[in-house]
């Protein structure tokens, strides 16, 4: 038998990093139509967030999520734990809105209204005001530490910290009355949980908008991962028109670039420099793209300077690009059956929730039967005892009248009128008596009717069981 010697194959060692090294991004500031819309949304969301906490309504904070008393105040509305359904409806509306907007315009929420984008935009504005434009920032970071560099960096971080702590303070101010919270801050008497949440939310803002920035969108946000499932060929996405733009290359404005075999892209890379996630949209759709439109504004301005048609980078759909659809045909496909179904369901849920809130009875009643055995009086009448809880969800005191129905001759033996203070609940025992022989032995259904004495149309009926012993 012939023995074949085994020749060792040299193994080539390849070193691979497990994590991609972070490349710091220095986005160039960019003005334009989409940039203006981003700032409109920054102002709108931040005026809403920082301002609403200070509004008053009926002598209390207009929007307050009071976890201690388990009541949510939203202007004239007081929601109790029993109104949890509205929170569930709000979550369903948010999820459906996200589906709808993603199906229509991809990650448009990320680019314009996501808190991560909004705070990053504000933090970048502060950075630009203190450290200067993109090139000045790159130069400053590359330079050795000096008094000038130290003072600029300190000023930037101080401004970021003030804004972050103010954000944390405002956040906590939605759970603890903000005027009271401000007094506690000024007198250094904050409770441990208030300190924890103020610092937690503040430092989360500082870290996410100051340092993590695009890393949050790339690696932490789950929406970036599953949004592609909601995309199809008729979803609006930010796209570079390869057919029009390639081959790329610099050229003189006056020459006929088509005669030179060039496309419309002058390869200036400004679209890459303005991108907050540091990608080159000319390489095609990438999951890092948050659809902010900064590259569209940048490229449109380059096109204007070159006297070329705008829209080399634009919001369009894959279908429109492949089939060369005009904008009318593209928009017809954007509002396709899928988006109409999402929109229809969303409108129905919003309408149902609005009607339910409009006709919301500001009174809740809970009835629990006392566990004790029914009592038989000297005359043979039978008495059952119940615990009634009446919740007045309005911010004015009310007097309620209680009656009982369901068994002939049934009556309430103790007080039938009860005062309940504004936005309060009262629990009290109620003795119900029926004449001898009015109901068969065993259990019978009765109904408690609780009505507002002044406005009887505000009324709630609650079922209960009446026991008749053998
Ligand atoms: S901004 Fe426009 S012209 Fe400049 S590189 Fe980007 S796509 Fe090309
Ligand atoms: S590629 Fe354009 S739209 Fe996408 S994140 Fe970058 S700048 Fe914004």
Image (spheres, grey):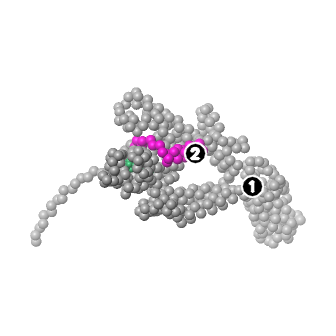
Q: Residue at x 56, y 63 (%)?
A: 340
| Residue 298 picture location, percent across and down | 43, 46
- In the rendered image, the residue lying farthest to the top is 147
Q: Which residues are magenta?
A: 25-48
Decide whether the magenta segment is chiefly helix, strand or loop: helix
Q: Which mark is residue 363?
A: 1
Horizontally, is 275 left or right of 188 in the view?
left
| Residue 253 picture location, percent across and down | 36, 46
Mark 2 or mark 1, earlier in chain = 2
| Residue 5 picture location, percent across and down | 13, 64
The quadrant of the image that shows the N terminus is bottom left
373 or 20, which is in the foreground?
20
Residue 401, located in which quarter of the rendered image? bottom right
- Reading the image, the residue beneath label 2 is 44
Instruction: Evaluate if marks 2 and 1 touch, with contact meaning CB atoms under 8 Å apart.
Output: no
73 or 56, which is in the foreground?
56
Disc 2 vs disc 1: which is toward the camera?
A: 2
Q: Residue at x 56, y 43 (%)?
A: 43
- SS of the residue under disc 1: strand
Q: Is residue 20 visible in the rendered structure shown here? A: no
Q: Is 56 colored magenta in this rendering?
A: no
- SS of the residue under disc 2: helix
The number of numbered badges drawn on the structure is 2
């Amino acid at each position: 038998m012939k023995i074949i010697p085994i020749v060792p194959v040299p193994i080539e060692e390849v070193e691979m990093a497990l994590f991609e090294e972070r490349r710091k991004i220095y986005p160039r500031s960019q003005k334009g139509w989409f940039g203006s819309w981003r700032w409109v949304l920054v102002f709108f969301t931040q005026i809403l967030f920082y301002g609403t906490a200070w509004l008053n309504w009926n002598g209390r904070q207009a929007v307050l999520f009071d976890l201690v008393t388990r009541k949510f105040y939203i202007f004239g509305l007081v929601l109790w734990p029993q109104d949890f359904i509205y929170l569930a409806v709000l979550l369903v509306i948010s999820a459906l809105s996200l589906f709808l907007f993603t199906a229509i315009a991809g990650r448009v929420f990320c680019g314009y209204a996501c808190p991560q984008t909004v705070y990053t935009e504000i933090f970048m504005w502060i950075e630009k005001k203190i450290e200067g434009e993109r090139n000045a920032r790159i130069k400053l970071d590359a330079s050795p530490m000096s008094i000038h560099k130290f003072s600029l960096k300190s000023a930037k971080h101080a401004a970021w910290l003030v804004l972050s702590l103010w954000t944390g303070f405002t956040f906590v101010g939605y759970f603890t009355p903000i005027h009271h919270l401000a007094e506690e801050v000024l007198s250094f008497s904050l409770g441990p949980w208030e300190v924890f949440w103020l610092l937690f939310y503040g430092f989360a803002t500082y870290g996410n908008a100051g340092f993590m920035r695009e890393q949050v969108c790339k690696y932490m946000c789950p929406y970036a991962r599953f949004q592609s499932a909601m995309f199809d060929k008729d979803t609006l996405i930010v796209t570079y028109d390869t057919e029009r733009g390639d081959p790329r290359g610099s050229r003189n404005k006056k020459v006929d670039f088509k005669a030179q075999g060039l496309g419309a892209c002058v390869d200036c890379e400004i679209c890459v420099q303005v991108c907050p996630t540091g990608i080159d949209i000319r390489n095609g759709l990438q999951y890092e793209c948050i659809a902010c439109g900064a590259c569209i504004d940048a490229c449109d301005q380059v096109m204007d300077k070159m006297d070329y048609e705008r829209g080399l980078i634009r919001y369009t759909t894959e279908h429109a690009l492949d089939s060369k659809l005009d904008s009318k045909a593209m928009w017809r496909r954007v509002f396709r059956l899928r988006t109409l179904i999402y929109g229809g369901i969303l409108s129905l849920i919003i309408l149902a929730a609005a009607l339910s809130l409009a006709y919301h009875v500001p009174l809740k009643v809970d009835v629990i039967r006392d566990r004790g055995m029914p009592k038989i009086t000297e005359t043979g009448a039978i008495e059952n005892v119940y615990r009634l809880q009446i919740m007045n969800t309005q911010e004015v005191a009310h007097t309620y009248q209680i009656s009982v129905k369901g068994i002939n001759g049934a009556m309430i033996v103790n007080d039938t009128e009860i005062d309940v203070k504004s936005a309060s609940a009262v629990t009290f025992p109620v003795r119900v008596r029926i004449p001898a022989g009015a109901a068969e032995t065993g259990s019978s259904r009765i109904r408690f009717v609780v009505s507002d004495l002044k406005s009887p149309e505000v009324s709630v009926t609650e079922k209960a069981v009446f026991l008749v012993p053998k």
